[in-house]
Image: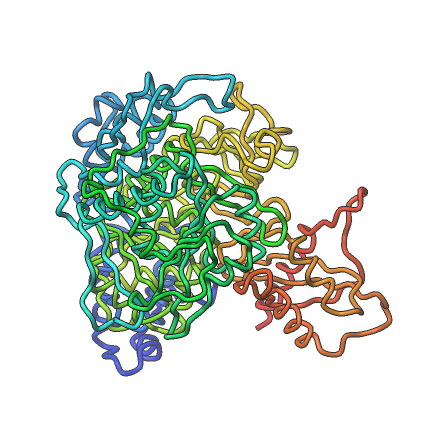
Amino acid sequence: MAAASHKPLAAITADDLAAAAPGMDAAALYSALRRAVDSCASDGAADPAAVWGELCRSLLRPDVPFAVHRMLYYGCFAGFPSPTPPAWTPDPKEAALTNVGRVMEARGRELIGDTYKDPITSFPDLYKFSNENPEAYWKMVFEDMGVEFGVQPSCIWRASDAYPGGEWLPGAELNAAANCLTAKPGRSSDDVAIVWKDEGKDSEPLNFMTLEELRKKVCLVATALDALNLPKGSAIAIDMPMDVNAVVIYLAIVLAGHVVVSIADSFAAPAISTRLKISEAKAIFTQDYILRDDKELPLYSRVVEAKAPMAIVIPVRGSLPIKGLRADDLSWQDFLGRVNDAKVENYAAVMHPAYAFTNILFSSGTTGEPKAIPWTHITPLKAAADGWCHMDIRKGDVVAWPTNLGWMMGPWLVYASLLNGASMALYNGSPNSSGFAKFVQDAKVTMLGLVPSIARTWKNTDCTAGFDWSTIRCFSSSGEASSVDDYLWLMGRAYYKPVIEYCGGTEIGGGFVSGSLLQPQALSAFSTPAMGCNLIILDSNGNPLPQDSVGIGELALDPVLFGSSTTLLNADHQEVYFNGMPEWNGKVLRRHGDEFERTHDGYYRAHGRADDTMNLGGIKVSSIEIERICNRVNDAILETAAIGVPPVGGGPEQLTIAVVLKDQSSQIDDLNQLKLAFNAALKKLNPLFKVSSVVVVPSLPRTASNKVMRRVLRKEFTQAAQAKVSKI
């Protein structure tokens, strides 16, 4: 892990610390370092993990310069035999207080048998139990979360020819939104369900909404929806920032028996139009503008340009009327004004079979057609169960995750917090600011989720400095690859609380690999498959490696996976996920497409997409979509290849464009100007996409069938970047 230039702890001097922390008492830092090392020493050398834990507790406060944190981390694990040293190790007393630890202490021997020892030691046994005994495991989780069914399922799971992974909750009827609006065991309707603040009002008090207040508002909107006289099961879109109104509308659509169509508020009109057409949406909720830094960014006009169906438009400045509405569109006030029934707060939730749709979300695809993935009433239970087990979201917690309902983590946040009896923390503004950092402090957030690019921005701008994040019990990260240094810095902001890496997909409703507060956590690595999920790594010939063996290859999933998709609206689900896949234990494996490694010490590491899909800023996009745009930027270009290259040291993929010129004897004088032209053109695809480098190549490597081998280019560019760094 550590490069040779990193000094081991024993070689670090007071002068080294003085250079890393100018203005601080280097002698005092050095004394604290020696005390930590000595306190962990026994008859032999001190255990590096124990020393690191003591340094985190006694010396590495958030106000100590990160250069010291970094020096001591790498020094502590210099020469460590594994590339995944533990950056955090669970404490037995704290482990017993987690959701999983509490259940295991009470029912460990009942679930696992006489081999049960304690929550930490027996966690791998519980994971094995979740796969071998889905009936008992999921009943236990539903009971602890307080899930209520209108009609109880006949069983948890049964084999079925209709579903490749079997049928979950056969015969059950429920409403996922209704489960969010009832008090969980040990909680009351007067407890806070949502805490929020708007950007620019950072000095004002927090806003709170109790569970009962949320229920009444959701019932009001559900009743107003009924007044539109749409057929039950209609698709209704939401295209707005994830604020309190968006959450209320989302829950109301599901409560009333309709289906949410999720559209990110950053999309341009063509992308909005595509999603509305695929879903056959009958209405859309939106805002007139999005406020950012006192700027009004038009939103309703984009919806109109997309030729959307009837729109219900919320004024971002609540006291001002909306002007210029289309004839069939409604203002928020007029929409709610249709409700005259004084008993709307007792709205009866529409119960549905477990596999009825609740939400249509979309995977990669911004200019091309994206896959339309329906979530059912089962999917929210998967999202919440992941939060219960892996992020340890407990009753009374405060959960924040900057996101949008257009991406799966938006609905995930709604369900993972409310179904677990926790409060949802929403900041209506940019998370890349001191305002958001203050909100995390003031809201007393206990679980903070993010994508790695946000952590990198915080680190580079130091916008979190001076804020107290000590209430955070863990972080979680998803969406893209993370950097060791960025997340070491992040852990230090909250007195070294762990980062639970989380990887899954919209079609899974959550994760297939994650971490746990009952296991040591390494930076930029996953410590366990998700509960109830078997991971299979395929070798270079596409054959399954022995389970739990060391190896690297394309990842496949056991199809018996609670909450995963069973259909696509605009593609053949069987063809996309199962055709051509090998069998394992008598079942055809489910395709996922990521390349994964299992290390010799049992961690998992992600190595990007195994196909030609890239992950840029947490958004999956096809190389072909980017190339289609770049090919038209300059008449001298014959063709391009878009490659996601991981930076040296880890982190989100960076976009490199390989360019082949029509005239091989000619030159493009200024590659930087070409890069700027590419970036300007790609803004129309997505404003978050950015080209990091441009490389002119004589030709693109191709297969015998003329397919571009982007993996070859990715390997070449990655090796070139590593060689360049090694020369510095």
Q: Residue at x 80, y 46 (%)?
A: 706
> Is residue 699 visible in this depiction of the protein?
yes
Quadrant of the frame with the N terminus: bottom left
Q: Position of residue 640 (x, y in %)?
A: 73, 60
Query: In this orientation, which residue lies closer to the viewer: 232 or 353?
Result: 232
Position of residue 315 relative to residue 191, above or below, is below
Residue 61: x %, y % from top left: 24, 67
| Frontmost residue, 397 versus 221 | 221
- Horizontally, is 422 left or right of 635 in the view? left
Would you place residue 504 above or below residue 51 in this image? above
Q: How many marks?
A: 0
Query: In terms of depth relative to the viewer, which is nearer, 382 or 607?
Result: 382
Please say whether residue 87 is visible from this viewpoint: no
At horizontal 27% and vertical 35% (from top left) the residue drawn is 121
* Quarter of the picture holding the C terminus: bottom right
Q: Would residue 621 be found to the left or right of residue 218 on screen?
A: right
Residue 281 vs residue 483, the one in the foreground: 281
Residue at the spot x=12%, y=47% of the render? 190
Residue 1 against residue 489 in the figure, above or below: above
Q: Is residue 638 left or right of residue 404?
A: right
Left or right position of 5 against 532:
right
Rendered image quadrant of residue 638: bottom right
Q: How is the image coloured?
A: rainbow
x and y percentages locating residue 117 in the rendered image: 22, 30
Q: Residue at x 45, y 26 (%)?
A: 560
Image position, residue 261 (x, y; %): 45, 45
